[in-house]
Amino acid sequence: QVQLAESGGGSAQTGGSLTLSCKVSGNSVRSNCMAWFRQATGEKREGVARISKTGLPFYAKFAKGRFTISRDSAANTVDLQMDGLSPNDSAIYYCAGDSRRASGCSLGQGDYDYWGQGTQVTVSS
């Protein structure tokens, strides 16, 4: 059974940075598409960034240029470096994996079948 555990959330000020990490257990981080999603209070969950099996990243428009998704095969983690944070980035951030897709990779949450519990990010002005 694949398990995901996020860490690295916390508080930051506007313009600051945080790095989230998702530890993958039960599978290799290179076996599946992996992604980060977020959900702000009262809002729908939205995709932030994903990384394909071959290591290609893709970002939501709001994340491009500020966030960087990467994976560490040795540590078996998927990380999200977030720079230039604003209060709009405050949300619970979730790590997710897609074990069903044979090729390609999406940022649609319906395509992801295993999820972490989430980590809170709060950005103050």
Image (cartoon, rainbow, N blue to C red):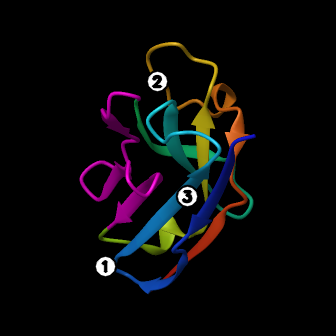
Mark sitting on residue 23:
3
- The x, y position of residue 120, in whole percent, is 63, 72
User: Alpha-carbon distance for marks 2 and 3?
Assistant: 20 Å
Q: Amino acid at mark 3?
A: Lys
Q: Amino acid at mark 1?
A: Gly
Q: Are marks 3 and 1 in contact (CB under 8 Å)?
A: no
Asked if residue 120 is positioned above or below residue 112 in the image, the reply reads below
Q: Position of residue 78 (x, y in %)?
A: 45, 52
Name the residue rendered at 75%, 40% in the picture: 1
- Estimate how packed mark 2 is, as few (under 14), some (14 to 19) or many (20 or more) residues with alpha carbons within 10 Å: many
For residue 5: magenta? no
Residue at image position (31%, 54%) is: 68
Give left or right: position of 106 versus 62: right
Q: Earlier in the sequence, mark 3 or mark 1?
A: 1
Alpha-carbon span between mark 3 and mark 1: 26 Å
Q: Viewer-nearest of labels 1 and 2?
A: 2
Give residue 15's mark.
Answer: 1
The residue drawn where x is 37% and y is 72% is: 85
The answer to whether residue 98 is above or below residue 12 is above
Tag 2 secondary structure: loop
Q: Is residue 111 above or below residue 125?
A: above
**In this rendering, position of residue 85 left or right of residue 123:** left
Reading the image, the residue beneath label 2 is 105
Mark nearer the viewer, 3 or 1:
3
Q: Secondary structure at mark 3?
A: strand
Front residue of 1/103: it is 1
- Residue 56 falls inside the magenta stretch: yes
- Amino acid at circle 2: Cys
Q: Which residues are magenta?
A: 53-82
Earlier residue among tags 2 and 3 = 3
Relative image position of residue 122 (x, y in whole percent): 56, 78
Helix, strand or loop at mark 1: loop
